[in-house]
Image (cartoon, grey):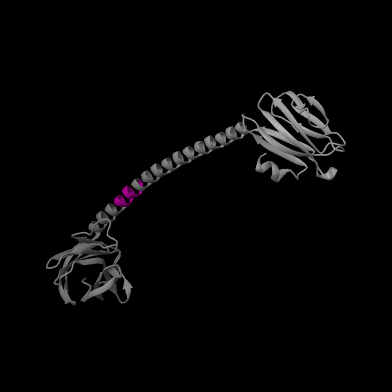
Amino acid sequence: MSTSARSLSSAPRLRFDVPRTGGAFTVPVHPDVVTVLYFPAEVVMAYAAEESPGVALDKQGTQVNLRPAADARRSALTIVCAAFRVGLLLERADAPGAAAVQVEFREREAEDAFAARVERELGRRLRARELMLTRAERDLARLRGEFERTAESAAARRVAAGLLVRHHLAEGGAEASGASVVLRMHRVLWIGRDAFVFASLENRGRAPCEVTRVALRARGVELDRAAAFAPPAAADARSGALGVVAPGASGRCVVAAMAADAWRGVPATLAVLLGAERREAVRLQFPFPR
């Protein structure tokens, strides 16, 4: 007798999953109740053990209707269907309400087949999702490429249009020193309304300098829109560095200030920020050239 059968024996409706090798189960019955047994295939035979008290059996296709005799306390029953063979121990319930009204026997393989179908369907949906993600990544890469080409074209048009309006190189020459670095501003290139500040940073310390930003300000307004540094930092630099200057070496940078023509002749500040914490290492003041 299985543990699951024992735990379900108090229920008026029972369901058992039966392997192809068959099984033994306990079913509560009562003389005042007709218990109906359902099977997944046609019932071939149903019979009670010779030593068991009488049990009225009515076999109809895939089901068996049974009722124990009034004096039967416990009976043994064997039922064979086309799918499996089961042995039943019919125990008299204390009251009609505690007897099983319906008992369903199912093939365990059918449950396994259902689980296999679910697994196949999940696999199919997972593959469809992976295909969708692959297509989305491909479309995203295409859109990114189109955006980059559009941005490059827009930048080129802006430079070309600015050159038609004005292009002028204003020499500088300002210099400032920090604890272990020297910042020099060399010149400013005007293209239309945009200014490009050329500067260099000398590292006089013993450790490399990770430059994370070269800030350009005028009267408290942030003017730097972009910056390029040489030598550049590694692509995977955790600090987000623009460039790295080795001890005893110098690095060069260009800071772009877009639409900066309103700041011509105004005192400006150029500052170098180092490391992930963006610590200001040196600050240089100079008049924004006309």
| Left/right of residue 285 with respect to residue 147 in the rendered view | left
User: Residue 288, position in %: x, y?
Assistant: 23, 73
The residue lying at 65 percent from left, 36 percent from top is 17
Q: Quadrant of residue 225?
A: bottom left
Viewport quadrant of the N terminus: top right
The stretch of residues the image draws in magenta is 146-153
Which quadrant of the view contains residue 84? top right
| Residue 269 lies in quadrant | bottom left
Residue 150 forms part of the magenta stretch: yes
Task: Name above or below for residue 273 compared with residue 81.
Answer: below
Query: Where in the figure is residue 153, as x and y percent of width and height?
Result: 30, 50
**Which residue: 41% across, 41% down?**
134
**Depth order, front residue of 17/178:** 17
Residue 2: x and y in percent read: 66, 40
Res 190 seen here: no
Along the viewing direction, whichever of 268 and 99 lies nearer the viewer: 99
